[in-house]
Amino acid sequence: MLVPTISGLLALVSLGCWLIVLVHAFGNSVWKGIAALLCGLYWIFYAVFEFEHEHKLLIVLLALFGGGAATAARLMG
């Protein structure tokens, strides 16, 4: 019962971090937001090189690896 709960929470945190970067991209420029929404490679480029936030490293790492960690936890449990 604990593993599915942790897996679900980790997936939600990953989605939230992904949305933080996406909202920042739309705030910077509409075309950057659309490109980040439609092209995952551009989202990664934007997150690494243009995204500015106090907790940038944590947000980007959770967005990139949180979903994979949630899936791995779900498969193990």
Image (spheres, rainbow, N blue to C red):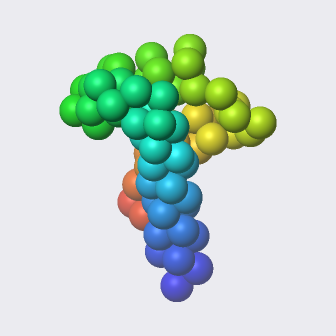
Can residue 8 be seen by looking at this rendering?
A: yes
Can residue 66 be seen by looking at this rendering?
A: no
* The one of 11 and 68 positioned closer to us in this rendering: 11
Point out residue 55 in the picture as x, y percentages from the top left corner: 74, 38
* The one of 74 and 16 positioned closer to us in this rendering: 16
- Taking the image as shown, residue 46 lies to the left or right of residue 42, namely right
What residue do we see at 54% from left, 68% from top? 9
* The one of 30 and 10 positioned closer to us in this rendering: 30
Residue 4 vs 31, above or below: the answer is below
Point out residue 43 in the picture as x, y percentages from the top left corner: 39, 27
What residue do we see at 58% from left, 44% from top? 62
Residue 51 vs 3, above or below: the answer is above
Point out residue 22 in the picture as x, y percentages from the top left corner: 43, 40
Point out residue 10 in the picture as x, y percentages from the top left corner: 54, 60
Most distant residue in the right direction: 54
* The one of 46 and 71 positioned closer to us in this rendering: 46
Most distant residue in the bottom direction: 1
What residue do we see at 47% from left, 21% from top? 46
What residue do we see at 55% from left, 58% from top? 13
Residue 55 vs 45, above or below: the answer is below
Q: How many marks?
A: 0
Residue 34 location, quadrant: top left
Residue 68 vs 64, above or below: the answer is below
